[in-house]
Image (spheres, rainbow, N blue to C red):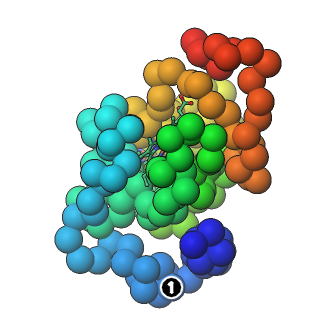
Amino acid sequence: MKVALAGLCVALAAGIVGACRQHGFGRGGPADNSYCFVCHTNFKEDSLATRHARKGIGCASCHGESDAHSADEDNLTAPDVMFAKEKIAPFCMNCHPRRKIARKREHKAILAGTATENRHCTDCHGTHRMAVRTRRWDKTTGELIPAPSVDTWRGE
Ligand code: HEC
Ligand code: HEC
Ligand code: HEC
Ligand code: HEC
């Protein structure tokens, strides 16, 4: 599964829209996110997730199926795909290219690279954040970053 997803993300990065369609992006009915809501209840109200789910783009379209992550009761296994801050805009812009979003006044600074606050698409779009953090993984390798003590990541 991980390999297939890596391929999918490469396809996205290359802007091969056809390949993404093949994987069901933006086609068919709304996406079913209930599998993830078992644990991520607070993402039910998040507009980034709900707006995309309506168009068939579910949690799994952006984060991968993440079966091992979802099945791990110890929560040690990372989801298949995570996003370091600098990867967010390029990822979103695979589907929302510059020419489509450039006209909005709110987008001028981020597209010009001059934004001093709200530097990431998700700073303005959605409430796509966890209130509490108990785990950290390297967002590129998925490796668990050991917390120096049990509660270290809480309150961050
Ligand atoms: C069994 C419970 C469980 C299920 C089911 C689950 N997750 Fe998670 N997920 C967690 C926990 C626990 C964390 C870490 C939260 C924390 O730091 O406190 C997490 C974190 C994440 C993160 C943040 C990774 C990061 O650090 O950037 C993403 C993304 C994520 N999950 C996606 C998903 C997706 C997509 C699904 C459905 C396919 C899913 N999860 C299903 C328990 C679950
Ligand atoms: C796989 C393609 C894809 C990706 C990746 C994607 N989007 Fe979307 N997004 C869509 C589609 C399809 C819609 C439905 C509306 C449309 O046709 O523009 C949409 C809708 C939206 C809307 C609402 C537009 C409206 O007028 O209702 C916003 C805001 C948005 N996306 C922001 C983002 C952000 C921020 C990211 C990155 C975190 C992102 N999108 C990633 C495909 C994508
Ligand atoms: C400073 C805040 C801010 C940032 C940063 C931001 N947006 Fe927006 N964006 C808005 C506002 C406000 C709207 C209009 C209201 C809405 O649709 O949510 C909007 C609208 C949109 C729309 C709807 C289509 C349109 O042009 O009306 C899309 C798609 C979108 N943004 C994508 C993105 C992407 C992709 C990024 C990152 C490259 C991004 N936005 C960064 C504030 C922002
Ligand atoms: C359109 C693509 C997209 C969709 C759909 C999406 N995510 Fe995300 N998700 C992202 C991006 C990009 C980030 C990184 C956001 C950031 O760091 O600001 C992220 C971050 C997260 C995080 C980490 C938040 C934190 O506090 O660091 C969790 C947990 C998560 N997503 C879960 C989900 C779940 C559950 C769903 C479905 C209900 C979902 N995501 C749907 C793109 C998406």
Question: On the image, numbered disc 1 is attached to which residue?
Answer: 19
Which residue does the image show at 47% across and 50% down from the upper left?
A: 70
- Residue 22, image x, y percentages: 42, 86
State the residue in front, 81 or 124. 81
Which residue does the image show at 55% across and 56% down from the upper left?
A: 68
State the residue in front, 30 or 95. 30
Which residue does the image show at 46% across and 22% down from the upper left?
A: 131
On the question of residue 124 being in view, the answer is no
Amino acid type of the residue tagged 1 in the rendering: Ala
- Residue 18, image x, y percentages: 47, 87
**Horizontal relation, residue 72 to residue 84: left or right:** left
State the residue in front, 146 or 107. 146
Q: Quadrant of residue 53?
A: bottom left
Above-or-below relation of 96 to 46: below
Mark 1 crowdedness (10 Å alpha carbons): few <14, some 14-19, many ≥20: some
Element type at mark 1: helix
